[in-house]
Structure formats: structure tokens, C-alpha cells
Image (spheres, rainbow, N blue to C red):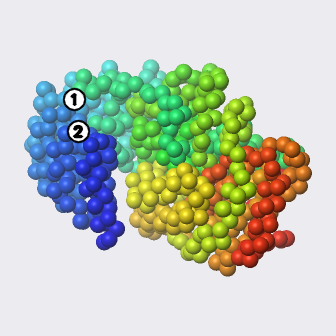
Amino acid sequence: MKDNELMLQRIKEALQQSDWKIRAEAVKRLPLLGEVVPLSLIIDAMTDPHRAVRVAAVEVCAELAYRIPVAVVEAALADDHWSVRAAAAWALGHFGESAPGPLLLALIDDKEESDLVRASALHALGTLDDTTHGEHIIAALGDTSSHVREVAALVLGNRREKAAIPALTYVLTHDEDEFVRATAAEALGQMEDAIPETALLAACSDDGRQVAVAAAHALGMMRWEALEEDRGEREEYFPYYKSSRVDSARSSAYEQRMPHKQLRFSDLSFLSIMILALVSGWIPSALRKPLAEGKLTYPDLTKYFEQLIRTEYIRALLISRQVVIHLACLWSQPAIFKDYMVDQPARDAFKRLLDTGVIVPLLLHETTPEETPPDDASAPAFALWKAVCRQVRVHYLRFDGDDESRQELAQKNFAHILTPQGSQLEHELQVWPQGVSEQHMLPEITSQQLISLLDPDVCPPQSVALCPISLGCLQLEDVLVLRATEEWIIYIECLETLLQYPFDFALYAPKLYTASLHYARSASRLLQQKHPQRQLTTLCKPVAELSISIGGALLVIIWTKEGPIYMKAHEERLQMLEGHEANVSVQFCIREWSNASEKEKFFTGIEFIHGRTTMARQQWKALLIHLAHTQAFREVKGEDIRQRAIFNQP
């Protein structure tokens, strides 16, 4: 109850801010309050000066339809802006028997109303459990608006309205709009034993790529693994008026598509991540030797790499505000593009993350996110990527390779996840793109700064936590839900604070450790609610771990229940650094003690210090002397199982 009261107070404060974005986000958090959300706050938000806040309030009404009077939403149909009216029309579909069917029919027939409002009203009508509306929806296939026709096909497919098969078949072969024809093909594919195979086979040769893909999918002809799964009933993750069903290339006069936005590296959030596992040519260090010796081949490891990339992709989205991904990886990596395949449940979640700038494509040789690649080996996936780009506003980066671009990238201190353990000391500015690190003067790290990190009481005693058994249990839709939780917000704030004040480690590390445990519990609750019959969570014992690398020599401190222990390795590398400058990096990791080598665990780590030193051997010696004189630390040597997991690197 206290947590809800605190959240309510924060929401009230945010609703008083002058920035409409803050107010809109505050409204979206109201459902997190559950039964205690005040109706007055929602009603006040529906009269906010900015339309985005009013839209958010109407969408909250849809989510809380079980306790919101339908008249509250009906009133929003009189709003001055089309987007609020569209949201209200869509929201009425969530009110079941209380929904005003005649009012929705009147909206659909109102040719002076915005096409997207009429389309949203049609979508709402189609969700109602009323068989008498079938004829009205079929008639909408002949509407003058492509938006309305598209939604009519969408709804008829979801309802499996077999009486509509002749009309849908006609639309598939005659409608002038590619997206309407594609939606008709998808709808026909949901008609079970009544699928018109002849018409769908012909549609596979349609000039429109979207139509051909949809028709082939409907016939079960696609060989992509992601499309061979059971279709199930399609669900619109977002309302039609801002979903993939609205083709932004032909948007109505009420709202023109915003062009893609090119960012500078300085525009990125402080807590942004570039995934090392997606860098071209990346290989985990533990596999380099067997590959070089011919004991393994790349085909042997294809599935493993795909699983690893998927894990780090999900992990990055869970522990950062923005994730930078090379453009080609977005349509060439199956671990990523399967999220926006036709009818994948994560499709709208992916587009939401792309549209809001959470996923940021990085362009190297391309000029726009939609530029056709020179190699068409992955053409089917690229066609789907291009379709996604037409439906969202992509926030992207360009790295031109000139001195200005290199300097700008070098000055952007990306946060770095350990991806995977075999690469824990690598840094993007060291390995990609070439030449950046030489132009970037890293800060000099002193012995005293490093010693300040070695506090035996820095982390609370090892705790038992409930966490997902694997990141593979989480889908992209789950990521979107988790990023809206209070636990995620607190975790990210703690992480950002540590990155901003790295040498106050003793003050902020305990807070980050506690926030991590709460965040893991939040993810576990989500999985338990979605899959109550499956065992997707487990009890684990996460430990806090500090890794200090000086010129390649590695010192690891782990806070255990019995007290902090430390281990060291690769000291011989310091012999080659006499008189030379060396890199210094420090990483704080939270990982499971019982099986530290698992790469799919929920807990992770972050590099929060990266600098240089000209006194590598002296600093290493100073650290060891300090540890030896501090009785609380105990050195672990030899065959310790945890040591083998950390130091098993070629």
C-alpha cells in the first residue's frame, strides 16, 4: 500500500509539469495503481491542453474499462482533435455489453469524420460479441477509405467470418491498395477449412511484396522458422490509429508522417548500449581457438550464435534506455527480425521500441534506414524491415568514417554490458570502429581512485532472489511491459547514478544491488502471471562482483555471505607494459553464484570505469598491498570452481 501511495504522489507531481511528455507518461502509469487509481485524475487528464495526454487518458480508460463509466469515453468523441476521437472510438470496443453499438455504427457511416476515427470505430465494433454486426463490417470492405477497408478485412479475419470469404477474395484480387489486399490475404488465411487456395496462390505473384508475403503465409508456404509456428488469433497490441495497419506512406490529411530522424551520438541517452555480440566478425574469445584449429566450424555454431545474440539483444533492452544496433543486423539477424515477421505477437512491440527511439539503427554506408542493401540474400526479411520503416519514425545514427564522426563516437561513453562472459574485458572503442581509440584521450586513473573501490562492506550480504530461469523466457512484449514498471525505473536510475559517479562506488553499488533484486522479482511476477502452469522462475543467490583490469591483468572481488574474497590472474601481462600506457577498466557485475558460467541468466554487469594509466605495475602492486593489509578480504587460489568460470579465457 505504501508503494502505491508513493507512486500516486509521484504521478500527481508529474501531472503538474509543464512538459506534456512527462504528463503523458504519468497518465500511462495510472493502471499500475490498480484498484486505487483515482477516477478524477483520469477525467482531468482528458481535458489536458495537449492531445497526447488526452489520448493517453482515453487509452487508460480502455485498460480499466471494468471500472470506468462508458460515458467518460463517449464524451471524448467530441474532442477537437481527430487522434483523441480515434482513441475514444477504439476504447469503446473494450466495454463489452456496455459499448454503444449504434453510436459506433453512426461514426463509421459519418463520411465527414476522419478516416482513422471511422476505422477505429469499425475496429471497436468488430471486437464486440454481437453476430448482428457481420453484415455492416462486410459492407465496409467497399468503403471509399483504404483505412476503413483495411480494418474491415482485419476484423473479419479475427472473427473468422466465413460469410465474408467472397467479399474478401474480391478485395484480394481487385482492391487498388496494397495494404488492403495484404490484410485481405491474412484474413482469408484465418478461415480454417474454407481457405480459398486458388485466389491465395494467384496472390503470391502480386506486384505488391506485402500481398505476396501475406498470401504465402496464409497458405503455409513460408519456410522461415518464425512463420511456421501456430498462428493463433491475431491481437492488435496497439490501437489501429497508431498500429502497423496505418500505412504512414499514405497517411490522411489529418496527420502527415514525420520523416525519419537522424541523431548525433551526443543526442543519445547517457545510458545507451551498443551490443558487442552484433559487431561484424565478433566471436566469443572461448571459441576463437577451436575455430582457428578447425575443431569447430561456423555452421556448427549457427544456432548457438543466434541464441546468444537473442539473449544479449533482450538483455540490452532490459538494462538501458537506448540500444544502438547496426542497421544490417536488424534485417539479417534471425534473432532480431523474427520479432517483426508477419503476425508475430512482438511485431507491434518492436515498432513501438523503434518509433520511440529505444532501438536506434546505426548506418555505416547507408544514407537512410530504408536503403536497399547491395546483397539481396536476405531480401524477404529486408522487405519486411522496409515495410516497418514506412509505418514508424525511425531514430537513427550515421557513422561516416570521417574524423568528425570518429571524434563524436569516441566522445560518447557507451555503457557496456558483458556480452558474453568470454568477452568481458573488450570495449567497443578498442575493437570497433578501427582508429577511434587512438583519437580519444581516455581519463587517467590513479591508484587512490582504484583503492577507493575496495570497501569490504560495499554490498549487502548475499540474498536469495526470485528470478527468471532464462532471458529466453522473455518476449519483446514482456520487455515493453517491464520498461514501464517502477522497478525498472529505479534500477535504471541507480545504474545511471553509478555511471555518473563511478568513484562513489561504495555509496551507490549497494543501491544498485538491491534494485537489481527487485527488478528480477518484477520480471518473475510477470512470467508467473502469463504462464501460471509453467515453471519459468527459480530461486537464485546473486552475488556482487567487481572486476578490475589493468593492462590485461585481472583482479576480481566477490562479496559472499562469508565475506569478500578476491582472485587474480594474468599478472604476467604486466611485464610487457613497463614504460607504456595501458588501459584500465572496471566492471560491476551481479550474477548468480551457483552457476556463474550461464549466459542467459537475468542478472548482468556493466563497465562503469574506462581509462588509462602509465603506471600499470605500480597500480597493480598498490591494489594487492591494500587487500593484504585489509583483513576482511580473503584470497582464493587454485581449483576454486568460481575462479575457473571467470578465468577460463584463452
Where is residue 42? Give x, y as percent: 20, 53
Q: How many marks?
A: 2
Tell whether 371 sits left or right of 389: right
Tell whether 158 sits left or right of 368: left
| Residue closer to the observer: 130 or 464 | 464
| Residue closer to the observer: 22 or 84 | 22
Where is residue 465? Give x, y as percent: 53, 72
Q: Amino acid at mark 1?
A: Asp
For mark 1, give the secondary structure.
helix
Report the residue marked by disc 1.
115
Q: Amino acid at mark 2?
A: His
Which residue is at a point 86% across and 52% down the rendered structure image? 574
Tell whether 534 sits left or right of 111: right
Report the residue marked by disc 2.
50
- Tag 2–tag 1 contact (CB < 8 Å): no
Q: Please tell me which of labels 2 and 1 falls first in the chain.
A: 2
Q: Quadrant of residue 485?
A: bottom left
